[in-house]
Amino acid sequence: MRIGIDARFIQGPNTGVTNYLVNLIKALERIDRDNDYTLFLSDPDYAGRLRQGSRFKVIVKEASALFWKNVWLPKQARKLKIDVMHFPAYTCPFVKVKNSVVTVHDLVHKVNPRWFSLRELILIGLPITIAIRKAAKIIAVSESTKRDIMKFYGVKEDKIAVTLEAADSTFRPINDQAALEDIRSKYKLGINFILYVGVLFKRRNIQRLIEAFLLMQKDKELPGYQLVIAGPGKDYFDLQGLLDRYKLRDRVSYLGYVDQQDLPLLYNAASFFVYPSLYEGFGLPVLEAMSCGKAVITSNVSSLPEITGEAGILIDPYSTEELYQAMRRLGQDNGLRERLGDLALERSRNFSWEKMARQTLEVYQQAAGNRKGD
């Protein structure tokens, strides 16, 4: 087969979709010896990020996003006789492209429209609706997202395939005490800290996390903990205002965007990881923390139980008290943290990019009409 991939999400800072795309391409390079791939970009500065070879080539066209996606790319797909065209981030061209596959990472705008303005709902919702209707096959990154696609768009189950993501291989247990001390020093962190990683979207439930942490600060039976919040998005949430209200500026550290090479060390240096999100299509930071052997507290909603299984503490994300009690348990029980960390590490080994790539390749075969998986 000739397979095309809209690879533009490698152009720019790392996001969840960037991680998905880069690791998918790398895994396809490792496992697929039969098919040819064309990776389409719009910025020549990023062409070097994708390795080219006999089966993988990169084509770059500088153009406006609207023209690139709806005119140039469909024309190239026809010209190159692409058998399957993969759009890895929610949308595809408005014109029909032969045997298109679209990956849907979440449907947060449908699950809770109140988190968005009317303009955002239109700009997000219309392209996704078109893509879901036009796609030959849809990839969902979790069973939860698959159920959402079926619920909100009435798509038949056999049109959707689930391919679970994985953590990058850099996320692993690190016992280098000097390196861990260096990362604490770099970010001015203490020995005992609780970590959150993720963009500060409304659905990430940061206010309840801080309120639960405030209850921890009032608990005299607990050792002194620091809360560390890593991730961009200060414009989405008035974090500093909340910290001033609760007088927590000296106990909560906001790191903003953290370089990718620092994240594994940051997870490893943490006492435990908390991610009380109200909704996730997948929830990669949870799996990253588990892959580092860290005990995890996360929510009992959407895709998050699929990731943790029995290897984490699941809480009702709408209950500050339940979140506090879970944080208190881990905060005062080192043995429990170690046991859950070991379980988390073991479970994380069930997720691999090679497995995901093989499942994706089956979707390509089905979309092209070579329906091995049917």
Image: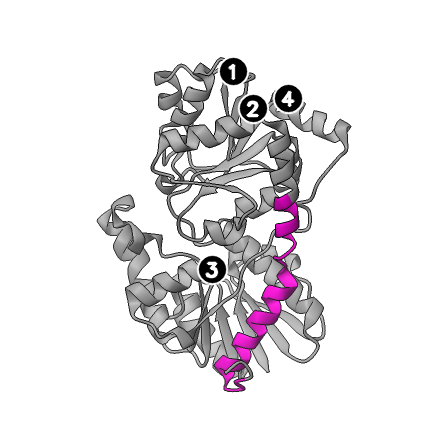
Q: Secondary structure at mark 3?
A: loop
Determine the residue positioned at 51% across, 60% down.
Answer: 8
Q: Which mark is residue 29?
A: none
Can you identify the residue that label 2 sits on? 332
Can you identify the residue that label 1 sits on? 221
Tag count: 4
Residue 262: image quadrant is: top right
Q: Is 278 situated left or right of 184 in this image?
A: left
Q: Secondary structure at mark 1?
A: loop
Q: Which residues are magenta?
A: 343-371
Q: Closer to the N terminus: mark 4 or mark 3?
A: 3
Determine the residue positioned at 32% across, 69% down.
Answer: 130
Can you identify the residue that label 4 sits on? 191
Q: Main secondary structure of the magenta part?
A: helix
Q: In the rendered view, would you say 98 is above or below 227?
A: below
Q: Closer to the N terminus: mark 1 or mark 2?
A: 1
Q: Residue 63 appears at what percent x and percent y? A: 45, 63
Query: Residue type at mark 3?
Result: Ser
Comparing 14 with 220, the one in front is 220
Q: Residue 303 appears at what percent x and percent y? A: 44, 53
Q: Gap between marks 1 and 2, in whole Å?
A: 8 Å
Q: Gap between marks 4 and 3, in whole Å?
A: 35 Å
Neighbor class of circle 2 (other Cα within 10 Å; few <14, some 14-19, many 20+) is few
Regarding residue 12, the answer to whether it shows in the image is: no
